[in-house]
Image (cartoon, rainbow, N blue to C red):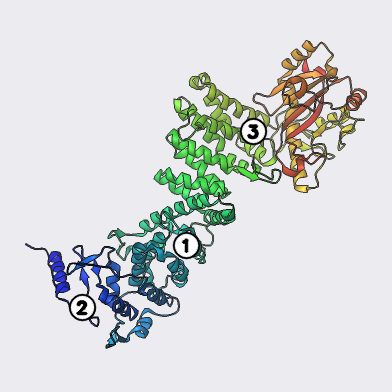
C-alpha cells in the first residue's frame, strides 16, 4: 500500500513535469526529498509573488535546496534569495514589525502584479498565514547563501527590538506571533553567529541594543527562572528548522552554546591589539549581565558567570568551565561567582579533574590584575576583599576537603587537566590567603571561621595517611600557620582575646590589650616613649612600630589599611616571641653575645616561619640580590643607623623584627617610587621573658 506522503510527492513530480513554463504562470517543481525548486524562467516572477505576501510562493522559499535540478536533460540553477531581491523584500516586511499589525502589512502588500512579460495579474498575494514564514526565509537564505549574513545583520534591528522585549512579547503587535516566532528568531541569531563567525557580521549584529544581553539571558530560560515564558511557550508545540520539537529548555541550551561561542571568539580577538578593547567590552557585558531580564525582575543580582557555575554544578558539564575561565580572566567576578564556585567545590565535586578546574577558577576569583606598577605587563595580586568573602564562604574548608578526598591518590600531584597538579593549585590558593592573612578583611574572616577551620584541620592532622603524605602535610602546615598568625592576643600578657575584650591604645590605636591594667603596665614600661612616633636614628633602639615602608602615603584609604596591618601584627608578636623562645636562646648562645646585643628576625613570609638571630653589629648588604643569611637578615643599612640603635637601646630588652608581605598598592612605594613588597615592624621585649 502506497503511503499518503509518497502519493503526494508523486503528484508533485507529475505536476512539475506537466506544468507550463510560461513566465506568466508560476509553476514550482519538487525534488525527491520534497524540496521546492524553481526553474530559472520563474525566478523573477517568484520574487514578485513574495513581494506581494503571497502564501504559496513565500512558504516554498523555506524548503529550497542548494542542488541543481535536471530539466529536459539540462541542469537548471536554483533561485537565489539574494540576487532576486527576496531577502530585501522580506527584510522590508520585517522592518514594519514594531509599529504595524501583520494584517495591515499584508493588506498593503496585496494588489495587482505585472509579470516580467508584461501580463497584469489582479489581486495577488496578501494571504500569508504567519509572519514567522519571513523569519524562516531568512534562515534559509543564511543556510544557502551565507554571504547575506551581513545584509541581514544590518537590517534586522526592528525584529531584534521586538524579540528582546521578553516582557511585553509583541511581534507585529501580537503576543501569539511573538511566541510562535521566538524559536525561529533564536535559530536565526545562532545561524548568523555560526561556528566560524565573520567578525564584521558579529560586530554589526551585536551592535543592536539589547541583543547581547538577551542572548546571555536565553541561556537561563526555564520554568524556575522564567515561568511566564515557559508556561506560554510550552502551550504552543514548536518545530525547529531541522524538524525537532522544541521547548524552552532547547532555547536555554542554544543560548549557553552562543555564550560559549562569543566568549571563545572574544578570547581570540584579545590577541589582536586593534580589537582588544572591543573583546574586553564584550566579555564584560556577557559576564556582568544578570540572568533575568531587568524588566521582569529588577532585583536579580545573579550574574551570567554565577549562573554558568550554577548550571555547571547541576549538569556536571566541565566544558562550561572553560567559558567561565575566559570570563573570570577578564575580571568578571562578584560575590555570587565566588560563592557559587566554592559551593561547587564543597558539595558538587567528586573527581580530581573537576577539583583542579574548581581550584583554578577559585584561585582566579580572589586575584586582581594591576598594571599600575608594570607598564609592559600585569602583576597579579590577591584582593583582600575577595579573599575575605571567599574565606567566609568556605574557601579553606574546600581546600582541606580536596586534600582529604584526593590527597591519597597519585593524581593529587600529577596534573590531570594541564601541567599544574591539584596539589599545586591548592597550595597556591592557600598561599594567596597567606599573603593577605594579616590584612584587615582577610584577618577578620579567618578569625570568624577559625573554629570550623580548626576542627577540620585537627581531623586531618590526626589522619595517618595525611601525616605520611609530604604534599598533604605541606598544605596542612600552611593552613596551621595562617590560623596561628590570626589570633587576637594582648600585646602585654599574651592572653587570647575575644571581640569584646580588645582594648586599643588611645594614642596610636596600634597596641591592643586585654585590660586597662595591661595597657597601663605597657605604657609605663616604654610605650609612652614610642606612642605615635616615627623611627629616626635617635630613637631606633626604643621605637616599637612600623619600619617598612619608611614613608607614609598620601592615600587615606591605604594609610588606614597599613594601620590595621600594624594592629594585626602587634597582636601576634609576643606569641611568636614566646613560642620560639628555645630556638632564639639556642641561636643567641651560638653567637656567644648578650641577648640585648641580639636582633631576632621573624620572617612571616615563609612556612614554617623562618627565625634568625644575629648581632646588631651585622650590616645588611642592600646592593646585592644574594639570598644568603648574611645579606638577607641584616637590618641596618648604614653606620649611622647602627650607632643610633646602639646609643638609644635599652640593655634590658631584646629587639625583634617582624617582616611580612604587604600588597596595598601605592602605600608601599619607597622614596625612589619603587614598589615595596614587604612590611616590617620592630618590637622590644624584656629578654628575661625568654627564660620565664
Say above or below: 139 vs 272. below
Q: CA distance from mark 1 to mark 3?
A: 47 Å
- Badge 2 density bin: few <14, some 14–19, many ≥20, Cα 10 Å: some
Image x and y of residue 318, in percent: 43, 42
- Residue underneath mark 2: 21
Residue drawn where x is 52% and y is 66% of the image: 209
Q: Give the quadrant of residue 566.
A: top right
Disc 1 is placed on an element classified as helix
**Foreground mark, 1 or 2?**
2
Residue drawn where x is 52% and y is 35% of the image: 398
Residue drawn where x is 72% and y is 15% of the image: 582
Which of the two labelled residues, at mark 1 and mark 2, occupies the earlier sequence position?
Answer: 2
Disc 3 is placed on an element classified as helix
- Residue underneath mark 1: 201
Image x and y of residue 98, in percent: 45, 76
Counting labels gives: 3
Amino acid at each position: 500500500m502506497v503511503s499518503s506522503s509518497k502519493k503526494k510527492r508523486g503528484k508533485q513530480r507529475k505536476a512539475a513535469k506537466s506544468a507550463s513554463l510560461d513566465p506568466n504562470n508560476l509553476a514550482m517543481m519538487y525534488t525527491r526529498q520534497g524540496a521546492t525548486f524553481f526553474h530559472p524562467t520563474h525566478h523573477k516572477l517568484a520574487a514578485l509573488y513574495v513581494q506581494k505576501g503571497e502564501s504559496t510562493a513565500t512558504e516554498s522559499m523555506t524548503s529550497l535546496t542548494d542542488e541543481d535540478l535536471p530539466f529536459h536533460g539540462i541542469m537548471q540553477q536554483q533561485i537565489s534569495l539574494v540576487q532576486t531581491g527576496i531577502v530585501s523584500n522580506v527584510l522590508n516586511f520585517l522592518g514594519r514589525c514594531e509599529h504595524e499589525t501583520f494584517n495591515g502589512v499584508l493588506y498593503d502588500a496585496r494588489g495587482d502584479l505585472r509579470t516580467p512579460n508584461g501580463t497584469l495579474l489582479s489581486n495577488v498575494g496578501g494571504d500569508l498565514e504567519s509572519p514567522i514564514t519571513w523569519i524562516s526565509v531568512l534562515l534559509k537564505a543564511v543556510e544557502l547563501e551565507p554571504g547575506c549574513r551581513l545584509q541581514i545583520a544590518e537590517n534586522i534591528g526592528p525584529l531584534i527590538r521586538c524579540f528582546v522585549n521578553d516582557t511585553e512579547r509583541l511581534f507585529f503587535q501580537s503576543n501569539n506571533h511573538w511566541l510562535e516566532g521566538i524559536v525561529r528568531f533564536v535559530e536565526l541569531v545562532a545561524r548568523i553567529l555560526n561556528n566560524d563567525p565573520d567578525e564584521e557580521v558579529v560586530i554589526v549584529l551585536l551592535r543592536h541594543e539589547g541583543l547581547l544581553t538577551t542572548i546571555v539571558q536565553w541561556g537561563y530560560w526555564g520554568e524556575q527562572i522564567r515561568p511566564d515564558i515557559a508556561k506560554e511557550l510550552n502551550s504552543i508545540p514548536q518545530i525547529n528548522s531541522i524538524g525537532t520539537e522544541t521547548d524552552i529548555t532547547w532555547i536555554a541550551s542554544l543560548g549557553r552554546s552562543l555564550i560559549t561561542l562569543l566568549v571563545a571568539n572574544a578570547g581570540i580577538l584579545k590577541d589582536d591589539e586593534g580589537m582588544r578593547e572591543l573583546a574586553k567590552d564584550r566579555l564584560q557585558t556577557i559576564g556582568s549581565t544578570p540572568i533575568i531580564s531587568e524588566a521582569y525582575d529588577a532585583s536579580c543580582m545573579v550574574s551570567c558567570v554565577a549562573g554558568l557555575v550554577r548550571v555547571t554544578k547541576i549538569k556536571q558539564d566541565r566544558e562550561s568551565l572553560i567559558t567561565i575561565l575566559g570570563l573570570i580572566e577578564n575580571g568578571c567576578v562578584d560575590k555570587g561567582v565566588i560563592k557559587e564556585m566554592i559551593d561547587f567545590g564543597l558539595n558538587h565535586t567528586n573527581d580530581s579533574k573537576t577539583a583542579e578546574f574548581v581550584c583554578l577558577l577559585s584561585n582566579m576569583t580572589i586575584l586582581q590584575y594591576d598594571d599600575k606598577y608594570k607598564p609592559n605587563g600585569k602583576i597579579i595580586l590577591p584582593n583582600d576583599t575577595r579573599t575575605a568573602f571567599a574565606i567566609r564562604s568556605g574557601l579553606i574548608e574546600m581546600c582541606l576537603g580536596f586534600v582529604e578526598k584526593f590527597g591519597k591518590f597519585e593524581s593529587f600531584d600529577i596534573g590531570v587537566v594541564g601541567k599544574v597538579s591539584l596539589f599545586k593549585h591548592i597550595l597556591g590558593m592557600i598561599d594567596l590567603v597567606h599573603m593577605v592573612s594579616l590584612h584587615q578583611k582577610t584577618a577578620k574572616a579567618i578569625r570568624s571561621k577559625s573554629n570550623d577551620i580548626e576542627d577540620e584541620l585537627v581531623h586531618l592532622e590526626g589522619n595517618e595517611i595525611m601525616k605520611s603524605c609530604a604534599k598533604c602535610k605541606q598544605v596542612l602546615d600552611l593552613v596551621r600557620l595562617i590560623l596561628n598568625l590570626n589570633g587576637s592576643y594582648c600585646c602585654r600578657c599574651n592572653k587570647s582575646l575575644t571581640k569584646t575584650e580588645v582594648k586599643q591604645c588611645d594614642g596610636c590605636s596600634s597596641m591592643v590589650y586585654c585590660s586597662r591594667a595591661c595597657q597601663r603596665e605597657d605604657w609605663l614600661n616604654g610605650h609612652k616613649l614610642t606612642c605615635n612616633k616615627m623611627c629616626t636614628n635617635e630613637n631606633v633602639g626604643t621605637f616599637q612600630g612600623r619600619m617598612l615602608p619608611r614613608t607614609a602615603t598620601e592615600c587615606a584609604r591605604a594609610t588606614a589599611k597599613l594601620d590595621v596591618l600594624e594592629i594585626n601584627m602587634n597582636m601576634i608578636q609576643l606569641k611568636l616571641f614566646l613560642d620560639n623562645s628555645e630556638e632564639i636562646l639556642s641561636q643567641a648562645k651560638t653567637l656567644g653575645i648578650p641577648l640585648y646585643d641580639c636582633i631576632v628576625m621573624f620572617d612571616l613570609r615563609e612556612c614554617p616561619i623562618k627565625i634568625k638571630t644575629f648581632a646588631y653589629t651585622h650590616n645588611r648588604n642592600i646592593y646585592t640580590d644574594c639570598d644568603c643569611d648574611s645579606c638577607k637578615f641584616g637590618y641596618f643599612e648604614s653606620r649611622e643607623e647602627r650607632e643610633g640603635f646602639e646609643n638609644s637601646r635599652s640593655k634590658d630588652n631584646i629587639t625583634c623584627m617582624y617582616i611580612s608581605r604587604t600588597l596595598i598598592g601605592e602605600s608601599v612605594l619607597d622614596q625612589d617610587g619603587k614598589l615595596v613588597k614587604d612590611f616590617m615592624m620592630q618590637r622590644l621585649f624584656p629578654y628575661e621573658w625568654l627564660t620565664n
